[in-house]
Amino acid sequence: VLQYHVIMFLFPLWRFCVCYTYTWLITIVRGTTIVDCIEPQQCQDLDIECDAHDDCHIQCSASYACEQSTIQCPIDHDCTVTCDTAASCLSLTILAEDASSFQLNGCAEHDSCLDMIIYCPIRENVETSCNLHEPVLADGLQLYAVHGWRDINLTLTPHSRDAENHTYNDSQTQ
């Protein structure tokens, strides 16, 4: 297990020092990159690019942790984003068009996925490649899927709006 703390600095302009430090924990475990944004505003307004050769898991588990950020999922690898705190993924953009599959978890807390934009994987001959688990409080969610509902799998669990498990896909929308 390799762990990296990534620190970026905005160097001083003119004679005044306006310095910001962004730190987030990146863990690489046997072909999987894990990005943990666990502090409020920790990954806010950032471009987060997953390693091109690994599966990628991004955890946004604090208020505004990934607000207004953009996530670039890896090419031909799995990409998972979890938004499990109020406003944790507010106005997040996820670029997963080239990923082999995408999964969104959470979005059950107030405004956790408000105004999120997801570009689903473009896959041929695959049942679904864009999996959304419990996006029940995802007001303003925009999904872009080349093959429409055939690309999207929406799963609600008992503590969601429905009292039992349901999976929605293209066969139920025809």
Image: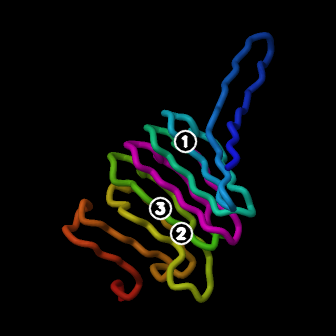
Residue 103 vertical position relative to residue 111 in the rendered view, above or below:
below
Residue occupying the far top of the picture: 15
> Tag 1 or tag 2, which sits nearer the N-term?
1
Q: Position of residue 122 (x, y in %)?
A: 62, 76
Q: Is residue 142 left or right of residue 146?
A: left
Element at badge 3? strand
Residues shaded magenta: 69-96
Q: Is residue 81 magenta?
A: yes
Residue type at the position of mark 2: Tyr
Residue type at the position of mark 1: Cys
| Mark 3 vs mark 1, CA separation in Å | 15 Å
Q: Look at mark 1 in the image and give the residue it sits on.
A: 37
Q: Position of residue 146 (x, y in %)?
A: 57, 77
Q: Position of residue 164 (x, y in %)?
A: 22, 71
- 26 or 65: which is nearer to us? 26
Number of marks = 3
Element at badge 2? strand
Q: Look at mark 3 in the image and give the residue it sits on.
A: 104
Element at badge 1? strand
- 107 or 164: which is nearer to us? 164
Q: Look at mark 2 in the image and give the residue it sits on.
A: 144
